[in-house]
Amino acid sequence: MLNSMDNISFHRMDLPLDEVKPTEKSRRVIVFKTKEYKPRESLLTDLFASSGEVTVAYNFLAGVFTLFFLRALVDDVINHGIPFYHLWLVGWNFDQLPSTLLVWSGMFLSTFVPYTMMKYWAHIPAKKVTALTDSYMLVAYLVYMVSFFYFPLRFLFSSGLNCACSFIITCETTRIAMKVHSFIRENVPRALERKTGGEALKPGEVSTWPSLEQFVYFMFCPAFVYRDEYPRTESIDWSRVRAHATHVFALIEFVNLVFTQFVQPILSSWNPSTVSVTDNIIALFTFIPAGMICLICLFYGLLHSWLNLFSEVMRFADRQFYANWWNSQNMAEYYRNWNLVVHDWLYAYIYKDVAQLIGGRRGLSVAQTAVFFASAAFHEYWFGIAFRVFYPVMFMLYFVFGGIFYAVSRSISDRGVWNIAMWFNLLIGTGMFVAFYGQEWYARNRCAPYSNSLVDFVTPRHWTCTEIH
């Protein structure tokens, strides 16, 4: 159902509408976008092929990586007597990878449950379906979603997974749950059409319901909005696969070098019981370069190399996973362009659904807030569980400061000024992330807990640490 409102021009955050059409009564009808997939390369792939400036930036970062690696190699040999000693952090993070992947396999196989349930419900004739049947299906879906998050988290805590493996569990529960929800959400209208006899079968077809093969392809392809078919390439370019895989491993090592050579040495000698407020503020600025390198590695390693690797292997032709976020003209454009894959899901299943459910200007405002909140909450969920702390830095950065900066950015009309403000926001945010989470991580391992367990859970220890274990 579309919402009609008087004189609405839509310029809100990262969730634009297709268009706003006038009606006969000088009212306007909001028309929401529908995601369309088409063959296209990632922006950086095109820029590398056509722009020497981008290649220079790549070469610069490759040079920085090489220098960091040489520094680590010299330090390993001189101070530890073992080449590649600095890889201890990688080994620590992935120590329980086999058991993590085993649990991940169970998580994936469990998705056949909602697929089967949905198929069964869709093929029940309308005359046999009651409101009670539909209620049972809804409750079963909710129970599945709760269980899907609960049992992997129980394994995570009981096994004491370290950071990287914890991220695998929390990020994959989120990713797979989003995929399952998209499949259900996109196919409920199809199921209702079947029940009312509106399904149009082609000659020789038994059913147009999505096959198991289509479902499995969707679960692995780099798209969060379900479609029966996606544009495909003719063949797999294995040289591209090797290049993207190499970049993924190189960027994991880049982050490892940043932490083992520049972050961990500072934090390992950091005594929270003697550090002043001034020292904490200075630490924020100290860790900005490390945080920014990690941000670039995350973007290039995940949103470009990792997704392009899967696209090439699966012959997925639509590789527009991000847009020109680094040169955004406003905050809305930055939020939208940073991660188009997740943006498509947020737009389709939170923003659009909430806006249509509530209606009016209030519906748009609530939908916008819901998107900000969901994004902030899940970022905090991933990082909080990985580091075993309740220190809502990510939530504050995304939901509170992000919302404030978005409001302020709307008053900045000069593109150059805005771009400087955007980079300042990113730099200070990454510095806060590394400094605050890093300090709290070490405080949790060194400082005595608060006497009250609830207070100890919700209050950062490094704020008032006076006693070292």
Image (spheres, rainbow, N blue to C red):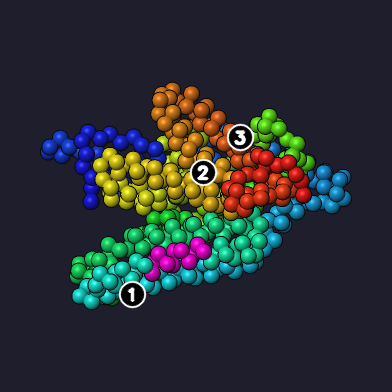
* Region rendered in magenta: 140-150
Q: Name the residue under label 2.
A: 395
Residue on which the image places disc 1: 120
Amino acid at dot 3: Val
Observer-side mark, 2 or 1, equals 2
In the image, which is nearer the foreground, mark 3 or mark 1?
1
Location of residue 430 in the rendering, given as x and y in whole percent from the top left corner = 59, 38
* Residue 208, image x, y percentages: 29, 69
Query: Could you tell me if residue 217 is visible in this image?
Result: no
Give the prevailing secondary structure in the magenta stretch: helix
**39 or 32, which lies in front?**
32
Say whether disc 2 or disc 1 marks the residue closer to the N-terminus.
1
x and y, in percent, of residue 246 in the image: 63, 52
Give the alpha-carbon distance from disc 2 to disc 1, as whole Å. Answer: 40 Å
| Residue count near mark 3 (Cα–Cα under 10 Å), binned few <14, some 14–19, many ≥20 | few
**Residue drawn 75% across and 54% down?**
88
Q: Residue furthest front?
A: 451
User: Which residue: 66% across, 36% down?
Assistant: 287
CA separation, marks 3 and 1?
55 Å
Which callout, 2 or 3, points to the residue nearer the camera? 2
Frontmost residue, 366 versus 297: 366
Residue 300 located within the stretch drawn in magenta? no
The residue wearing badge 3 is 56
User: Does residue 466 show up?
Assistant: yes
